[in-house]
Image (tube, coloured by chain):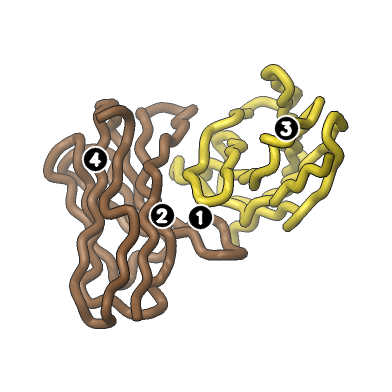
Chain colours: A brown, B yellow
Amino acid sequence: IAGITQAPTSQILAAGRRMTLRCTQDMRHNAMYWYRQDLGLGLRLIHYSNTAGTTGKGEVPDGYSVSRANTDDFPLTLASAVPSQTSVYFCASSDSGDNNEQFFGPGTRLTVL
Amino acid sequence: GQNIDQPTEMTATEGAIVQINCTYQTSGFNGLFWYQQHAGEAPTFLSYNVLDGLEEKGRFSSFLSRSKGYSYLLLKELQMKDSASYLCAVQDSNYQLIWGAGTKLIIKP
């Protein structure tokens, strides 16, 4: 692994189904983030984790949950998908500190029908 | 509320110079970032400003005025590969990034 990876690359999902998006980083970064990106809107923070064992809610957390059992992994779960969750999802990680440049994974394109 | 404004789209000519502006109103300020995002790809870091003034990095420069809530990204000697979206993001008092919607830059030969 080099950097930050996400799986799956893309997914089509029926409404009401449960889905977990995976994110793994090998940079030993403390902080990790989940964003969604929709056309015409900026990246919007869903959930974040400043360190293993802790998580926090971002701007648009409803319908999503996360866990941070270890430093490397930060999965995002949609408990019961709805069409409005159709989006591109990016996972990112950063070191602690003032200039916390975020490194992004390649993204997961999710379509909920 | 928190707000980041940048133009939706700009067009420039290969070899020319273009300036992409960003104005912001946020709860606290702990730095401003510029990212580049090619279509279908992830954002990648370009620059970080926390103090007023100009930061130069090769063909790209970024300027910040904290008193005016204003930044710009300057791209010189434009190349076709510079066609991308440019995202402005401000780090707020909680060290979270607040993102603008991005400026799509189209480079014409």
Q: Which residue is mark 4?
A: A24
Name the quadrant of the C terminus of chain B.
Answer: top right
Are there few (<14), some (14-19), or many (20+) residues within 10 Å of tag 4? many
**Residue A84 higher or lower than B22, as above or below:** below
- Relative placement, left or right, of A6 versus A100 is left
Report in which chain the residue with disc 1 lies: A
In three-dimensional space, the C-alpha distance between marks 1 and 3, rounded to whole angstroms, equals: 21 Å
Report in which chain the residue with disc 3 lies: B
In three-dimensional space, the C-alpha distance between marks 1 and 2, rounded to whole angstroms, equals: 6 Å
Q: Nearer the viewer, mark 3 or mark 4?
A: 4
Badge 4 marks a residue whose secondary structure is strand
Q: Nearer the viewer, mark 1 or mark 3?
A: 1
Q: Quadrant of residue A45?
A: bottom left
Q: Which residue is mark 1?
A: A43
Q: Nearer the viewer, mark 1 or mark 4?
A: 4
Name the quadrant of the N terminus of chain B.
Answer: bottom right
Say whether disc 2 or disc 4 marks the residue closer to the N-terminus.
4
Are there few (<14), some (14-19), or many (20+) residues within 10 Å of tag 2? many
Badge 3 marks a residue whose secondary structure is strand
In three-dimensional space, the C-alpha distance between marks 2 and 4, rounded to whole angstroms, equals: 15 Å
In three-dimensional space, the C-alpha distance between marks 3 and 4, rounded to whole angstroms, equals: 34 Å
Instruction: Tell if the residue under mark 1 belongs to the same chain as the one under mark 4.
Output: yes
Are there few (<14), some (14-19), or many (20+) residues within 10 Å of tag 1? many
Q: Nearer the viewer, mark 2 or mark 4?
A: 4
Instruction: Tell if the residue under mark 2 belongs to the same chain as the one under mark 4.
Output: yes
Report in which chain the residue with disc 4 lies: A
In the rendering, at what x and y percent does residue A96 appear? 36, 29
Say whether disc 1 or disc 2 marks the residue closer to the N-terminus.
2
